[in-house]
Image (cartoon, rainbow, N blue to C red):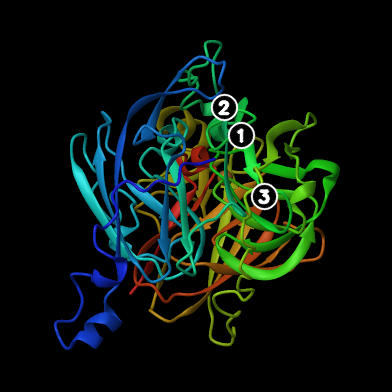
């Protein structure tokens, strides 16, 4: 189980602490506009970690020495304050994946903030307006920093009761380890990975452990919050005996429950599922490859009585908007191995793909341009209804993520019949065309990128400007 200890908690009762930005008027106004503050401190630093009880230690980069990083919890409506210090020897930032954040707190280096240099600190401070399953991760050279362990879960709850034993967080990762159980650093930056499916690992962990034995209640309902922290691996899970679960939230957003016997997550996606009878849960199995892997075991907790799960909301955060006056943005994705991209514009110059690959490490393009923080995909006005018409004209899957917003999509992730869902990361199949529909209600410069982190680094990302 992830440790649930908070690192620094406000010493005062939450209800007595107000944001410094609260209006200096009468008490009730300060209260209305203020948020109780939830404080944490995170230090990124080289750390040693043991994935298996009888295994040897692996050198990683971790937050507070924990793998995954400390679980951050907050109550909807609170202000989250994270004092972050960088003890790495390279710059980094923290991104709060799925949070409809203040742009300046979104953690994209050179776009929303200067990277936090070695030895420096940065305080992230933002309100959490939505409840759900989120995660945080490094966003500078993420293909290396996330691969070395810089991520953790962020859970925002609806009410005072934080997580209880019926509410279990599962952070899955596939690491690429070498013969001596160390991160395979030689393959970091491999052009082969960058042009194919990204960095795929060879060692699966759940909450930083290989095949952990996890506690579950003896009976009754329970919830699993699954998070895929892999660089590039699309993970699929089943429970023992392939018992179906009810999917109740996608990327933090509640949905009308629907049954699935396989839970598939692109990198960065989250799926919350409800299990009707905890007593039947013995095992979590990863089934994305031809060789199923026992991912985790579950064992009933001792006789202690666990209160029932509270019913959760079933409505998405907002409805699908009317499209009468929608702004349509075409995004044609090309590149990668076996693709149809022969050349693309990079820093204002048209160059051949071989040249771009070998000399710049660039392999992917949006609308004929190698992506980066200097590529503006759209300039929008606040309140616009937007359709991103995305065409995955490549031979590879891509998990497309929009910062600062969730979008509606007729998802083909759950079978042939398109299913309308609201989420922040969408897994696109090769050749797929999808409309990602959202209301541009959050001002700032927002990244739209593939969350196969190698694809992003190799050109699959651009900026959506909202003002
Ligand atoms: Cu991709």
- Residue neighbourhood size for the residue with mark 2, other residues' Cα within 10 Å, grouped as few (<14), some (14–19), many (≥20): few
Q: Residue furthest front?
A: 303
**Residue 305, placed above or below residue 337:** below
Residue at 56% in and 30% down: 209
Q: Regarding mark 1 in the picture, which secondary structure is present there?
A: loop
Residue at 45% in and 36% down: 143
- Nearer the observer, disc 3 or disc 1? 3
Residue 439 in percent (x, y) is at: 49, 77
Residue 133 in percent (x, y) is at: 53, 57
Gap between marks 3 and 1 measured at Cα? 42 Å
Query: Disc number at residue 322?
Result: none
Quarter assignment of residue 177 = top right
- Nearer the observer, disc 3 or disc 2? 3
**Residue 106, placed above or below residue 190:** below
Badge 2 vs badge 1, beta-carbon distance below 8 Å:
yes
Residue at image mark 2: 192
Front residue of this view, candidates 204 and 216 = 216
Q: Earlier in the sequence, mark 3 or mark 2?
A: 2
Residue at 49% in and 69% down: 158
Residue at 24% in and 62% down: 12
Front residue of this view, candidates 136 and 23 = 23
């Amino acid at each position: 189980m992830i440790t649930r200890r908070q690192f620094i908690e406000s010493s005062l009762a939450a209800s007595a602490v107000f944001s410094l930005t609260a209006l200096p008027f009468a008490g009730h106004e300060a209260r209305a506009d203020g948020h109780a503050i939830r404080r944490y401190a995170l230090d990124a630093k080289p750390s040693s970690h043991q994935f298996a009880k009888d295994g040897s230690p692996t050198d990683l980069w971790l937050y507070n020495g924990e793998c995954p990083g400390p679980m951050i919890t907050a109550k909807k409506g609170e202000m989250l304050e994270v004092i972050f210090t960088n003890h790495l020897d390279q710059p980094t930032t923290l991104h709060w994946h799925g949070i409809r954040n203040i742009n300046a707190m979104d953690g994209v280096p050179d776009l929303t903030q200067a990277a936090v240099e070695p030895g420096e600190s940065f305080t992230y401070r933002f309100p959490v307006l939505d409840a759900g399953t989120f995660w945080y991760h490094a966003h500078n050279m993420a293909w290396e920093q996330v691969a070395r362990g810089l991520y953790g879960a962020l859970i925002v709850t609806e009410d005072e009761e934080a997580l209880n034993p019926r509410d279990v967080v599962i952070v899955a990762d596939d690491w690429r380890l070498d013969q001596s159980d160390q991160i395979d650093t030689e393959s970091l930056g491999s052009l082969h990975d960058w042009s194919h499916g990204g960095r795929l690992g060879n060692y699966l962990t759940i909450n930083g452990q290989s095949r952990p034995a996890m506690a579950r209640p003896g009976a009754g309902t329970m919830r699993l919050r699954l998070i895929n922290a892999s660089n590039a691996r699309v993970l699929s899970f089943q429970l023992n005996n392939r018992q179906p679960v009810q999917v109740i939230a996608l990327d933090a957003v509640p949905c009308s429950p629907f049954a699935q016997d396989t839970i598939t997550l692109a990198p960065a996606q989250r799926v919350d599922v409800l299990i009707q009878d905890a007593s039947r849960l013995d095992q979590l199995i990863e089934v994305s490859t031809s060789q199923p892997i026992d991912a985790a075991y579950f064992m009933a907790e001792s006789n202690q009585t666990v209160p029932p799960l509270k019913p959760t909301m079933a409505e998405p955060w907002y409805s699908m908007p009317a499209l009468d006056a929608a702004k349509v943005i075409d995004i044609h994705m090309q590149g990668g191995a076996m693709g149809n991209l022969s050349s693309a514009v990079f820093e204002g110059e048209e160059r051949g793909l071989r040249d771009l690959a070998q000399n710049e490490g660039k392999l992917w393009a949006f609308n004929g341009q190698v992506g980066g923080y200097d590529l503006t995909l759209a300039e929008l006005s606040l309140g616009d209804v937007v359709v991103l018409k995305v065409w995955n004209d490549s031979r590879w899957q891509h998990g497309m993520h929009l910062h600062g917003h969730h979008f509606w999509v007729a998802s083909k992730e759950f079978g042939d019949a398109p299913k309308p869902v609201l989420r922040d990361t969408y897994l696109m199949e090769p050749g797929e065309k999808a409309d990602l529909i959202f209301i541009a209600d959050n001002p700032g410069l927002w990244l739209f990128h593939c969350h196969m982190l190698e694809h992003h680094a190799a050109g699959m990302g651009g900026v959506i400007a909202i003002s």
